[in-house]
Amino acid sequence: MRLLIDWGNTRLKWRYVDAGKRSEVEAIAWKDRPLGELFGEQWRSLQPERVLVCSVLSPLIEEKLTTWVERVWGLPVEWLRSSAALLGVRNGYQNPQQLGNDRWAALLAARRFCRSDLCMISAGSALTMDCLTADGQHLGGQIFPGLQGLRRALMNDVGLLTEQGQAVWLAKNTADGIVGGTLHGLASVVTAFVNQCEINLSVPVKVLMTGGDALLLNRVLGLEAVLLPDLILQGVECWVDR
């Protein structure tokens, strides 16, 4: 049995694969919780044969998971890291290791999902956008603040506003203005990126979306996007099956 982990900035997601059967994805918010307690709650009853992780966190935090896994299961942790090329995907970054591990995992999974020109959109703590050609060349991408970060910044500027708002176009109060403005603004960023990729490639592109805010963002996008909430975990599975 293999335990696959996607360790993001705010959420910890995992599934296990046993004899070709995949469990449902589980997820929890991990910030402000003792990591040792967190791992014990979620995984102590499992007996994996391999532990495979995609992480965007610091080596210091990763070391805590490594220590726990070695102590409890006697296993090494295998870390997915960005590389120059893998599984038909060629990294477009000048320094391939600078591309986020989560973005690399998503591109590996996207390549397996379809072999067309595509835009990979991840709407999480940050909004990341990447372009991948049909022959597997990563052309690069952009990074933008995520939806919740944009809202927190604005709410701080208006005096820690805490009211719940609605995503409307013509807001008649500040809460609605922030919620609608940030959501539609982020959608405009994604639309502009996709449009520019199509201009550069001279062909339509398929849009794949993942991340905690993907569903919300997709509701206001004027694009036909495919939602793949477990795409990074799919990328980890691609990597281990290589």
Image (cartoon, rainbow, N blue to C red):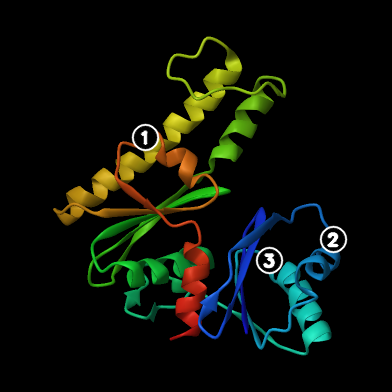
* Residue situated in front as seen by the camera: 29 or 161: 29
Lower position in the chain sequence, tag 1 or tag 3: 3
Left or right? Give the position of 130 relative to 53.
left
Q: Quadrant of the C terminus?
A: bottom left
Q: Quadrant of the N terminus?
A: bottom right
- Residue 7 sits in which quadrant? bottom right
- Give the label, 2 or 3, closer to the camera: 2
The reply to whether residue 5 is visible in this rendering is no
Q: Residue at x 29, y 47 (%)?
A: 194
Neighbours of disc 2 within 10 Å: few (<14), some (14-19), many (20+): few
Q: How far across and down, in percent of the image, does residue 24 sit?
A: 58, 65
Q: How far across and down, in percent of the image, does residue 152 sit?
A: 64, 33
According to the image, label 2 marks what residue? 34
According to the image, label 1 marks what residue? 188
Residue farthest along the left direction in this orientation = 202
Q: CA distance from mark 1 to mark 3?
A: 31 Å
The answer to whether mark 1 and mark 3 are in CB contact below 8 A is no
Element class at badge 3: loop
